[in-house]
Image (cartoon, coloured by chain):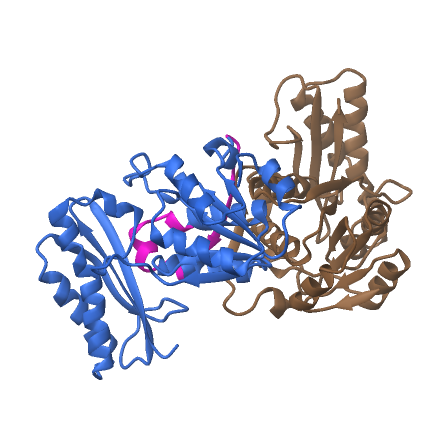
Chain colours: A brown, B blue
Amino acid sequence: MNTLYLIDDLQAARKKLAFPVGLVPTMGYLHEGHISLVRRARRECASVIATIFVNPTQFGPQEDFAAYPRDLPRDLALFEQNGVDIAWLPEQNEMYPPDFQTWVNVEDVTQPLEGKMRPGHFRGVTTIVAKLFNAAQPDRAYFGQKDAQQAVVIRKMAEDLNFPIEIIICPTVRESDGLAMSSRNVYLDPAQRQAALVLYKSLKAAHEAFINGINDAEQLRLVMSDTISQEPLAKPQYVSCANPETLEELSGPVSRALISLAVVIGKTRLIDNLLIGEV
Amino acid sequence: MNTLYLIDDLQAARKKLAFPVGLVPTMGYLHEGHISLVRRARRECASVIATIFVNPTQFGPQEDFAAYPRDLPRDLALFEQNGVDIAWLPEQNEMYPPDFQTWVNVEDVTQPLEGKMRPGHFRGVTTIVAKLFNAAQPDRAYFGQKDAQQAVVIRKMAEDLNFPIEIIICPTVRESDGLAMSSRNVYLDPAQRQAALVLYKSLKAAHEAFINGINDAEQLRLVMSDTISQEPLAKPQYVSCANPETLEELSGPVSRALISLAVVIGKTRLIDNLLIGEV
């Protein structure tokens, strides 16, 4: 595995990689979710570039950028074990030099849900992803369904800006008790860790209701918020039953939907989602 | 010459082109300025893609989008005569489908000069150029010094977003009497055409003053505005003596500068510029 730091070095190394090239962008502190992306890229691509960059521009001023967990030696070992060809670890100053002043902004699909709760978050995401795309020039890029809105936003950006890159969204990886893997789970104490099960429990309750014939969007949201309200440690930020492409909140009967929620437990903000109905 | 319309067709054809690939983006109605870009790309690149797209998003609501001159058969013949390999002519709906919602924005260098006079103009320019870059994936892209601020803005965008593309700025091509070539010159009646010489005359007067030891930025701006004021048909919008990279207006003695101006003659808005001092 080749470990690189500079954009120029990556672009030079990129020229020698066999087609197709897969890119797995991460913020490090890898868990099984990240590893599943690396494995899929390894399976589907002749070459795999994986990146670690904790992107400051997607954190709000009150968020956990400085505290975001980091473990570089372990991350590099995991990349190596899973067949990454190039690990790219740019420095902050390499990605955002002092006179940096260009932003990529996706408008409509960034407005609800996470975009509403985290102003500026998606502008940071789309800008860094555009930079990673141009620096690595992958043929395919792999992201997790766990960040459902991010997946929609990146697909839209890639389509609107004509990036010649296939965006591949991989299933959420869960702990054995159902909690979606997240680097932020490390913030939870044992009681909070137990309470965090309420996210997947709420989604499953709504999914089960849907399977049993309850297809009214508002009813499905109620099933989720009722479930959350049974967990005293959980403070819901939103529950949503939305169009999976436009992310517009649905009303009335639905045949398919993205159901998602954001919950704060202690000081930790957690999100989860399921796609329900016809694929 | 291969004439293409769809992004998918361009991206498929792109894969077969020999390295390096040069891109010449235009809005058509070609003049010698455009042709000089095509010739330089032809000289320096194994393959040349030239595009014609009158980009609606860089025109203001009061500007001349609908009236912008067009002559496709002549443009295609000129591309062919000058060795273009692929002429790409996307339709409006191909570039901006109904749910288009992604914008590229460069902040600081788009604020003064043209950016101040034409709100939203550069957001349209950088967004379409990012799309053209991704659709054509050139190794080099050619633009004219005539649009001096556009050149600075595109360089900044390419640098900030890590586009693996060399931006090449080619000298302004002028009529024999000094008027900078522009597709908009066709709007001028004979008296206005004569009056339009005042742009280059003003720049030359400032340049001559500079050579003769007048290096105070404010003095140089005065030389230009005095020269414009001698032409009754010309209404100045701005005269500028700015830092060539940041476009910040200079004061005091200068060793190098971008001197530029915008003038309205009749209903036609004209711009011109010179780089003066050490290169």
Q: Which of A233 and B159 is in front in this view?
A: B159
Locate residue A53, reporting x and y percent: 70, 61
Asked which quadrant contains residue A229, the reply is top right
Asked which quadrant contains residue A176, the reply is top right
Q: Can residue A163 be seen in this view?
A: yes
Locate residue B157, reporting x and y percent: 50, 58
Q: Is residue B251 above or below residue B271?
A: below
Residue occupying the far bottom of the picture: B213
Q: Residue at x 78, y 62 (%)?
A: A87
Magenta stretch: includes residue B2: no
Q: Which of A30 and A224 is in front in this view?
A: A30
Q: Residue at x 73, y 31 (%)?
A: A224
Asked which quadrant contains residue A150, the reply is top right
Q: In which quarter of the image is the C terminus of chain B?
A: bottom left
- Point out the stretch of residues depicted in magenta: B98-122
Q: Is residue A167 above or below residue B20?
A: above
Q: Can residue B108 be seen in this view?
A: no
Q: Nearer the viewer, residue B145 or A163?
A: B145
- Taking A94 as reference, is A72 left or right? right
Q: Which residue is drawn at 18% across and 58% down?
A: B197
Q: Residue at x 11, y 49 (%)?
A: B191
Q: Which of A201 and B244 is in front in this view?
A: B244
- Taking B188 as reference, is A173 left or right? right
Locate residue B266, reporting x and y percent: 15, 46
